[in-house]
Image (cartoon, rainbow, N blue to C red):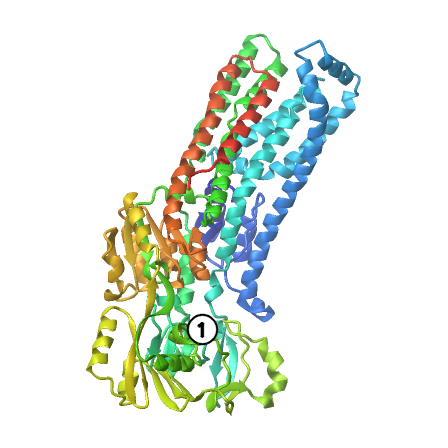
Amino acid sequence: MYSATCETFLESVAEGCDGVERAEASYVAEAVRVDHDPARISAADLEGALSRLGYTAYRREKADAEDEAAGGTRRAREMSGIRKRRSDDMLEIRYIAGIVFGTFLLVPYAAVFYPVYLASYSSRGVLAHYQNAFATLDGALFLPVLFVLTGIVLYLTGYPLLRGAYVGLTLRRPNTHLLATLTIVGAYAYGTISLALGRIDVYYDLTIVVAALVMAAVFAESTIKRRAVDRLSDLTFSQVDSALTLEAGGETRSVSTADLESGDRVLVREGARVPVDGVLLEGPCTVDEAIVTGESLPISKEPGQEIVGGSIVTNGSAVVDVGPEPTSRIDRLTETVWNVQSANHGVTRHAEVIAKRLAPLVLGVAIAAGGVRYWQGADATGVVTALLLAIVATSPWTLGFATPVSVAASVGQAVERGIVVFDETVFERLREVDVVVFDKTGTLTTGEMTVLEADAPEDLLEAAATLERRASHPVARAFASAFGSDESDAPIRGEERAVDDPTRADRRSGEAENQSGTGEPEPQSESVTIQDQSPVCDFRSHATGVEGTVDGERLLVGHPDLFRDRDWHLGSALEDRVGRAVADGRLPVVVGRDGRAEGVVVVGDEPRSNWAETVSKLDESGIDVVVLTGDTESASEEFTDHPGVEHAFAAVPPDGKTAAIRRLKADGRVAMVGDGTNDAPALAEADLGISLGGGTALASDAADIAIPDENLLAIERAFRLATAARGRLRQNLGLGLVYNALVIPIAVAGLLNPLFATAAASASAILVAANASRPLVDE
């Protein structure tokens, strides 16, 4: 889609099809959501109906049975993205071909026509020789060649503009494409009539230059949209396409998640993602639900407890009983994001509003100019020529050029400052934001488990780190990072570890292709014991901790409940320290040896260094700051007590975040800042979504802005850029209007000179481009 007018056009096309109940298009997401009766109109027929006038429609939905056999749902999604990119690439090829043709055509203009035009106002000197030389050329042959070649350029380069103008006329809603089309078609028609009359003022160059300039800006703007749409097409990155089901005989079978049924038993190995929601049958295990629920700490699961689809088993393995609906929360989050983003957000750009008002004025001026020429006694040809010349000169095509070139320049400057923009309407929407909502985990905090406090003997901490390095959950990584050495992860004496079954070696290559959603091969395995000279032996991993022998000492590291279950005495001092850590929203990890607890290590999610400064600056600029978190209220006090935080909501589930955003939107424009998959629906629901850091695929896809370097101060910088960008856009629109204010009276008076019109139009475009490239803000 090249303008907001495309939304209404595609909606009208879809709703005009028999069997379509409702259609909603989004210019922002380049998507059309259609509710239809498959018995009356198929999805393929809808694709054909929407693929008109250069549009290319393709389905987002998952693969059908035939697609599954050919490679599954992920391949189907990839093919949709490929079709989209091919469509964009074809438009780009047409544009480049048009530019090449146009450049060759401008050479004779620079060498011959421009001097001749100037010579028509002077009969002396070098210019007179140019005019005499041109008079000897065979214009009957030379000029028709320009007519044909310019027509080719008009078709290749200006096609998207012509399509946009047609859409605007069809809907009776003039747009910026119509203004540019009036200029390029008017100049082409004027030159053609002049050619037919034997005149030399065939201003085909204006057609070439205007089409090239406007489309260059449009393609720069379209590059932003392509990035956004490519990311939107990859929303299902966190979904799992296949699962391992446990058969009656204990064997496993890989099946598509689409084929799972209620009551199936699914095996999830350590490090793999749970494919669907269900109940844990066999465990225990530890899962990381941060990507789904926002809970920053790992959660221990016992048989009988619910387990969330999309979460990752970080310690142990799990057998999950598939629930009544074989879907995951990731699936539902993804669908929510698509539904919100494909909705019509009603984005109206200032240039489109101005175009709607100026188009009738331009036509009125052209008619007036033709009327003046008729009153002066001109014949029909003279009247038509004057009318077309007035359209060429007064059509505010620079408005269609000013908006995309301003946006492209603003986006480029934003990228230089660590702000990646996925949607070209961001600067207009960001300026109107009243409230900024921060998700706590991974946004105001680092999102990584770190050791915050340690009260235990140093030699015990080092031994605990050696033990924890054999595990893979977030707390183990925090221990290894804080107290461990750089020794490699050697095999462990007496450790039970899964290895390939040698009796199935001939099947490994085939089964390696049958991967889960996390991308790991899934060979059959058995437990064996490996002997070596490592300081760790008899290693055991539990749902709430680890144990083993290190250098002859028996160590236990884990949750206080694990120590209580093993009758390892904590003592009142350690119990008090554990209680304080829990009250602060931290995770207490007890370390002990040989039957006695000796210390407590407090692990948690550390705040980002510049979060307070960011909140203060937003508050000073008049923006309300709200904090949402899935953690407890005590874990959020450090943030909620900041004077710049207007409101705070704790223990909020993912769907609760979306509901909170919806309530806040009732009182103003809302921007949401998050990084996790659980934030994706809220990011999509907000008027503007900001994804911090690499984030998850789903969060980035739902956002309009990304801050790759995780610098929170870039958010406040984005607001300043938005304010400056809006002012710069208004300046550029003003330059275009000033040009029209000067030219319109001259055109109405019938005093307009074609050469002056061309020069003035080119000068206004140069001014707009130069103004757009100036720095927006001073650092």
Q: Nearer the viewer, residue 33 or 239?
A: 239
State the image coordinates of residue 374 (x, y, percent, origin top left).
56, 11
State the image coordinates of residue 747 (x, y, percent, origin top left).
53, 16
* Residue 149 higher or lower than 445, as above or below: above
State the image coordinates of residue 137 (x, y, percent, origin top left).
79, 20
Query: What residue sits 56% from the left and 58% below the top?
Result: 80
Q: Is residue 309 left or right of 642 when viewed as pictured?
A: right
State the image coordinates of residue 737 (x, y, percent, origin top left).
46, 25
Q: Is residue 668 left or right of 68 when viewed as pictured?
A: left
* Residue 35 higher or lower than 196, as above or below: below
Q: Residues within 10 Å of mark 1 (few under 14, many from 20)?
A: many
Work out whether residue 591 can be spotted: yes
* Residue 651 higher or lower than 298, as above or below: above
Label 1: element kind: loop
Query: What residue sits 23% from the left and 80% below the top?
Result: 574
Q: Nearer the viewer, residue 618 or 400?
A: 618
What count of labels does the image hold?
Answer: 1
Q: Amino acid at mark 1?
A: Arg
Query: What residue sits 53% from the left and 66% below the top?
Result: 73
Q: Would you name the residue on which mark 1 appears?
A: 273
- Check the picture and name the quadrant holding the C terminus: top left
* Residue 633 higher or lower than 45, as above or below: below
Residue furthest to the front in view is: 458
Work out whether residue 318 can be spotted: no
